[in-house]
């Protein structure tokens, strides 16, 4: 495969892989009759559903759109509560807020960096409707325990799998582990459609509701053709284009190769950085196989030292990043819901020390060794 996208002097923490096969697939659609609302959307949906082992798949315009659609399909409305980790991108909570729900944060486990099921169960109230499991950095959550809790309390279990397409938990792929799963196809994710996302479920009612919401709430009655349609309930335009789906289908063919390279780089990082004083490496799960969207290390001496290391690596052209500032520390969530520093100590301690170092399929071993040496020199 001849790559088209190039990495220049600056080494980002993540980067897409685009090759000539991707370009040809997109150009073919650009020259066709169907730029959007055509046959490639369903083809892409079916391909991802088959890969993940889900019955229904619904492609949308972004990972954020997927979350909004999924919450709507689950029946989230004003006054409901959604339990989630504070260690996630804002979209996980923002989309619930837009539907009138309250994000109820539950602390993470220090070893997995994912939501602690015991902490999640403690926060269940009569208003709770959903437990949202966020597969941080590509490592699946503890779905066996979260499923038990959700069933016990008659809740919907959702998975924000933006980081974890291709990951497995107890031998099962992400996409079949929760009642509803959402994916993202942003350029730094496992595969890309430029922007895009998907909702996966085995529940027919969820799928039907999601499909309507994606397309303005439009419903077409059997036997009534032509111009006639009905608005069954409010919806939005979250449709994806055939152009994006052409890229997605081409990328999906390479996904297993992308995952192999990510896992190889993660193993190499562990070997190269093991035993480095002042550095905490991500743990490796026994029951799960990570997709390694990120390689999040921790600077043991804390926030001040982390900032120093971050700044100096950036000055050297190494695009480290911090994922994420916990949501309860952002002004809106503090002001609106009364959250404050100290509420979730594990997430806060991780955030103060967090540093995501570059990891993506096109990264070379030489580039990785450069990152490792630069990091070691600063510790």
Image: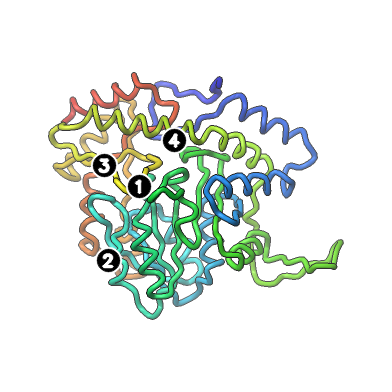
Task: Report the mark closest to the observer, 4 or 1.
Answer: 1
Q: Secondary structure at mark 4?
A: helix
Query: What residue is disc 3 on?
Result: 282
The disc at residue 119 is 2
Sequence-wise, the earlier of marks 3 and 4 is: 4
Q: Earlier in the sequence, mark 2 or mark 4?
A: 2
Is tag 4's residue or tag 1's residue first in the polypeptide sequence? 4
Q: Nearer the viewer, mark 2 or mark 4?
A: 4
Mark 1 and mark 3 lie on one chain; the one further toward the N terminus is 3
Q: Quadrant of the C terminus?
A: top left
Q: CA distance from mark 3 to mark 4?
A: 17 Å
Name the residue at 17% across, 39% down: 305
Category of crowding for the residue at label 2, using alpha-carbon neighbours closer than 10 angstroms: few (below 14), some (14–19), many (at least 20): some
Q: Could you tell whether 108 is left or right of 235 in the image?
A: left
The quarter of the rendered structure image containing the N terminus is top right
Give the Cα separation between the discs numbered 2 and 3. 21 Å
Question: The residue tagged with tag 1: helix, strand or loop?
Answer: strand
- Residue 288: assigned label: 1
Q: Earlier in the sequence, mark 2 or mark 3?
A: 2
Q: CA distance from mark 1 to mark 2?
A: 21 Å
Label 2 to label 4: alpha-carbon separation: 31 Å
Q: Which residue is mark 4?
A: 259
The picture places residue 189, in percent across and down from the top left corner, at: 47, 40
Q: Nearer the viewer, mark 1 or mark 3?
A: 1
Does any portion of residue 137 appear in the rendered image?
no
Q: Residue at x 37, y 39 (%)?
A: 292
């Amino acid at each position: 495969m001849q790559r088209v996208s190039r990495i220049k002097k600056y080494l980002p923490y993540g980067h897409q892989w685009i090759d000539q096969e991707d370009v040809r697939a997109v150009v073919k659609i650009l020259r066709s009759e169907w730029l959007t609302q055509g046959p490639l959307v369903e083809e892409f949906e079916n391909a991802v559903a088959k890969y993940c082992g889900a019955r229904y798949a619904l492609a949308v315009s972004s990972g954020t759109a997927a979350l909004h659609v999924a919450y709507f399909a689950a029946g989230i409305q004003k006054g409901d509560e959604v339990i989630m980790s504070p260690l996630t991108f804002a979209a996980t909570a923002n989309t619930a807020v837009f539907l009138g729900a309250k994000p109820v944060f539950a602390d993470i486990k220090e070893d997995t960096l994912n939501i602690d099921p015991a902490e999640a169960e403690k926060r269940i109230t009569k208003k709770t409707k959903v437990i949202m499991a966020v597969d941080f950095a590509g490592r699946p959550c503890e779905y066996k325990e979260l499923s038990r809790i959700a069933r016990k309390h008659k809740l919907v279990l959702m998975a924000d799998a933006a980081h974890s397409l291709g990951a497995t938990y107890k031998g099962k792929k992400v996409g079949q582990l929760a009642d509803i799963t959402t994916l993202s196809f942003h350029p730094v994710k496992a595969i890309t459609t430029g922007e895009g996302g998907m909702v996966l479920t085995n529940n027919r009612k969820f799928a039907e509701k999601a499909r309507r919401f994606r397309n303005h709430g439009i419903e077409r009655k059997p036997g009534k053709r032509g111009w006639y349609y009905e608005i069954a309930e409010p919806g939005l335009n979250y449709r994806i284009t055939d152009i994006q789906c052409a890229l997605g289908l081409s990328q999906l063919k390479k996904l297993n190769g992308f995952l192999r390279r990510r896992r190889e780089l993660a193993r190499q990082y562990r070997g190269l950085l093991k035993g480095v004083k002042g550095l905490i490496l991500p743990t490796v799960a026994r029951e799960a196989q990570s997709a390694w969207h990120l390689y999040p290390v921790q600077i043991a001496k804390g926030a001040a030292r982390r900032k120093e290391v971050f700044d100096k690596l950036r000055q050297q052209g190494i695009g480290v990043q911090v994922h994420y500032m916990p949501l309860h520390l952002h002004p809106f969530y503090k002001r609106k819901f009364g959250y404050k520093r100290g509420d979730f100590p594990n997430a806060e301690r991780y955030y103060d020390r967090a540093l995501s170092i570059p990891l993506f399929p096109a990264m070379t071993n030489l580039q990785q060794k450069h990152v490792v040496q630069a990091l070691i020199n600063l510790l």
